[in-house]
Image (cartoon, rainbow, N blue to C red):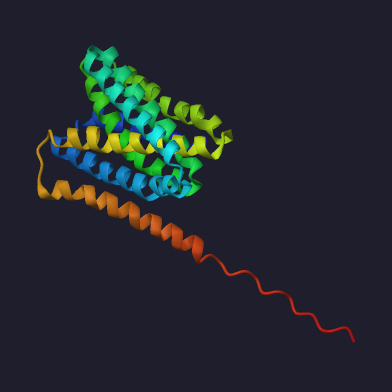
Amino acid sequence: MANLSIAFVPVLAVFLGALWALWQKPGAAVTSAIQHFAAGVVFAAAAVEILPQVKADGSIMATAIGGILGVVVMLGVKSLEEHWHGPVGMLAAVGIDIFVDGVVLGLAFLAGEKAGLLLAFALTLEVLFLGLTLTQELGETYKSKIKVVAIAVAVALLLPLGVVASTPVAGLSHLWITGFLSFGLMALLYLVTEELLVEAHEKPDSPMISALFFVGFLGLLLLEEYLANGETHGPAPAAPAITAPAG
């Protein structure tokens, strides 16, 4: 499954982020910059790939139900996270976030391979930050660096598991797929507005760091346009062979 293999790229990002955090703890400005850039990329992926697909399907009921459930689920997760404390609570909260990311990534591939690839790139940046944060938190509880990295990677494996969990949706009717895409759209918007940007603004900020949100958004938008133009202006079909009339 190509989609599943792509889902392991963010897992690799968590592994590299964990090694980075153990080797040298990134400063607040670097962390904020990563969060701003990742938020811009995720927002662009949602706006450019998922939203047009939901609008094209044109089902008001499916869009409304899926979107409402998406908001309710994400707010429910936030409520649970506020009541969880300590390493176990933190791992549970991060694990749910990553699993939902995997489900949304699997749903994005329903909108098209290009949508899935672009969102995979966006989520890779997001979970890179999670890998940094998770490693720093675990380092305060566990002294073994190998154990810290192993736990971070184990939690990241919930992302491919989320992709697998979303696979049966492909066999459902068009209306169901629209509803699930609407759910995924709300989850991505929540990720940007209530997690990445909120946490980024809790750290030292500057116009240059804030500009990275727009750099990420515009960068992914230009990448999508480049890929779209590549598909439109692909290699010209071969000219039909000309045969001489029988004579």
Instruction: Find residue 187 and report its image quarter.
Output: top left
Residue placed at 40% from the left, 26% from the top? 99
| Left or right position of 41 against 203 | right
Residue 88 shows up from this direction: yes
Q: Is residue 192 above or below residue 241?
A: above
Furthest-right residue in this view? 247
Residue toward you, 221 or 23: 221
Q: Residue 175: x and y, percent?
A: 51, 38
Residue 142 shows up from this direction: no
Residue placed at 27% from the left, 46% from the top? 40
Q: Quadrant of the N terminus?
A: top right
Residue placed at 29% from the left, 30% from the top? 130
Instruction: Find residue 80 and report its image quarter.
Output: top left
Residue toward you, 224 or 70: 70
Q: Residue 31: x and y, percent?
A: 19, 36
Q: Quadrant of the C terminus?
A: bottom right
Q: Residue 73: x and y, percent?
A: 34, 25
Q: Is residue 201 above or below residue 81?
A: below
| Left or right position of 171 against 183 | right
Residue placed at 54% from the left, 40% from the top? 174
